[in-house]
Image (cartoon, rainbow, N blue to C red):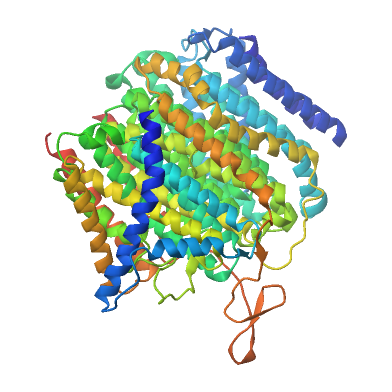
Amino acid sequence: MNLLAFLIIFPLLVSVALLLLPGERLRAGLIKASSLAISLAVIGLLFTTFNRSIQYFKAESYLIDKLMFLAELALAGYILYLGLKFRRGWVVLFILLQEALMIYFEYSHGWRIFAENNLFIDKFSILMSLVVGIIGSLICVYSIGYMRDFHEDYHKEIKDRRPFFFFVIFAFLSAMFGVVFSNNLLWLYFFWEITTICSFLLIGYKRTEESRKNAFLALELNLLGGLAFLAAIIYFYKTTGSIELSKVMLLGKAWALIPVALICFAGLTKSAQLPFSSWLLGAMVAPTPVSALLHSSTMVKAGVYIILRFASVLQGTMAGYALALIGGVTFLVASLAAVSQSDAKKVLAYSTIANLGLIVLCAGIGTYEAMWAAILLIIFHATAKCLLFLCVGTVEHKIHSRNIENMSGLIITMPKLSIMMQVGMAGMFLAPFGMLISKWAVLRALADYNPLLIIFVVFGSSVTLFFWVKWIGKLIIVSGHKEEIEQGVSKSQWFPLAALSILTISICGFFPLVSSVLIEPYCLEIYGRTITMSRGNVEIMSIMLAMVMLFPLSFINYGKRVKVVDAYLGGANINNNVQFRGSAGTVRSMSMYNYYLEDIFSEKKLMRSGMIIAVVLIIAMLGLSLL
Amino acid sequence: MNIFLNILLYVVLAPLAGGLLSGLDRKITARMQSRIGPPILQPFFDVLKLIQKESLVVRRSQNFYIGFFLILVIFTGALFFTGKDILLVIFAFTLAGIFFVLAGFKASSPYSFIGAQRELLQMMAYEPIIILSAVAMYMVTRSFYISDIVSFSRPLIYYLPGVLFGLLYILAMKFRKSPFDLSTSHHAHQELVKGITTEFSGRSLAMIEVAHWYENMLVLGFIYLFFARSPLAGVVLSLLAYFLVILIDNTFARVKWQLALLSSWLMTLIFGFGNILILFILPK
């Protein structure tokens, strides 16, 4: 209980301190110290609670409830002001509707609304808090160096608002812990809205026309989701008299399907599933640590977290099928769209949307096998994708571009970073790394439940392979003369990068442990049965992991027993392998560009048809829940 | 002990059989073109000669990827022929293929580069039907283990003709044969010099060749699974499939990548997915 309260309150205190503290060094020190404290606290939480069953905490709440209500009103007022100032009709409408509902609910039932237990912790929330705590802290440390470079060297035109930046980041961490530990749905909703606002503020950090536009888009869609969330809570309360997550989960299909569908709707907006995906793509204008923290590792995971909480209710229902289809379509469409992208952050964004889609697909199925796969996906994806975002952030500062075509030869120009990037990408799609273990589990879960849904997974994942490998290929190609430019990357960036690389690799080694200590017991708690990877398969995966890890050893033979020659260019080579003398003596230059296949994988067409299908499916999901 | 014996037998016999098959292939192809053709053992002579040649490289690390390609192909085969989880076999096979593609990238020559891109494109084209066939086999046998799939009471072809057809369609990609020899080709009529293998010579080219023999045996093994109930018929029919690929190789021109990709996906959808759909709807 103390640790829970610490994790929610401490980051909030730090965030206020960061806003007030003068001096960059003082702030950096505080960020490092508090990141360490948060990481230690989540690890402490793991060791003190992993062997206990689900625990509830009362957390005396009268005062807190009132404070939250006031904070909610104040924030709503702020959003309303911004909405009016920048003439965003939807924002104004959604926030007014939301406040009207909230005030109505508070005044008609306020004195009766009562949650016996406001906080809780179980295996799933331990896992989520580990992701938020450890990855979140690493990103905070990374941001110190990154934001310094960002303002002092690369974006002098943007006003330096670093204290504000870190204030929002730490407030966000506090809210994320709140989301994960809340049992009182009104609390959960409060923290949920805070994450929305943090995301809005950080996307708009640059204060350019583009970032403002995209920030408001994110805000609109997430407020719409929030509205659905609130409606679900009120519905819960009206029909059951309870606003506790644990009680609602036990109600079963007949009672809870409509509000669960509404909460899934909210989860879909937060996780940027089709038809709401556009906000996540727009969110890529934010500084890269923000994309890593909010838009790939933690906040968007809150959406699938809440959906997964209700997965057992959805199992076997038509609404569950509709949800699974939304996830499947999103996975497929986002993967296909990623093929035609050369902007590194956009590829990462599409891949994030796709993987969240895969998790939603699992949630819609809702069997114990699917649950196991989904939780694994959350962990593996958070680590590897965060690593990739941070790598791209540093590379962007060094080469002044985040176009994948410009990353050609990165293995020479930034050797350490390009290897970390390859680790991250391997973690995203390659056997025996994390995501492949999850894919194995997803395929099994689908084969047992409904093999027809597999069609999304097989096509989506084969496309995934295409766009990752061509990116890795680009990193290792070397043509012409290259110089190393890796110096000057600060320690506060190297440390999180190295830590995440090690984490990405080692998590594949000790995933059986994570599975047997946390995920399997969680499945047992919910379903009474569980699944695991058989010993033989774990051994095979370990052998493969060992083999891949041995690859660097081959560099002992570097340059031995080979004769280095120029590449064949179809003429007489001149000038360092990049030009040649063709027929009739003309000098021609050689260049290599990856395949983007825009004719077939047109982003616009794909997203448009994906949106239409998803809108139909969402209506179906909500409609079917009424039956 | 049995497992180790199996693995040992496979490691020794597969390249022998693969090499012989390749020799046979060249002989048959030659006869189809009214030539006499090389002796059946020619592929072995080629490899032995390649091993003795000097290794020329553009980038010093390019051959390491080939080494791992070979090791991983052998590893995949070992998993397959000892009856392990078919999904892991497919993943390992993909991993091996990716090392081959990365070798093409690493060589940093425009021809191997385009070859690598096309090889990747082909992987994207054939991956769906391969995973679908594993799932289809699971639907019939209720197991992902190859040992269980092989010992199922009836031949799988009885349930999965569509899936097999889908697999046969992409077979030319795995054998790197026309009409899908986009990334590299055994024939002289190559538009990309030698595609993905352009910059490989000597020992590493020999390794690619040997890996290819292993790969071919593995692919034929995959076809064999459909007839595994009666081993003799299985062997004969998978060899027949190989013959079919040779025949098509000699009668069709190379297609463009668009057609290769879209037609394979279409076949996967119609025959592979159609088959699964029927299997799912029909009562057991």
Q: Is residue A50 above or below residue A151?
A: above
Give the quarter of the image for residue A162.
top right
Residue A612: image location, x then y, percent: 35, 51
Residue A371: image location, x then y, percent: 40, 27
Could one spot residue B111 in this view of the protein? yes
Residue A11 vs residue B34: left or right? Answer: right
Residue drawn where x is 42% and y is 30% of the image = A537
The quadrant of the image that shows the C terminus of chain B is: top left
Q: Is residue A432 above or below residue B163?
A: above
Residue B192: image location, x then y, percent: 48, 73
Q: Is residue B181 above or below residue A90?
A: below
Residue drawn where x is 53% and y is 48% of the image = B68
| Residue furthest left as drawn | B283
Q: Nearer the viewer, residue A373 or B17?
A: B17
Q: Nearer the viewer, residue A286 or B110?
A: B110
Q: Nearer the viewer, residue B238 or A530?
A: B238
Residue B127 vs residue B66: left or right? Answer: left
The quadrant of the image that shows the N terminus of chain B is: top left
Residue B228: image location, x then y, percent: 21, 42
Q: Is residue A462 above or below residue B5?
A: below
Residue drawn where x is 41% and y is 22% of the image = A234
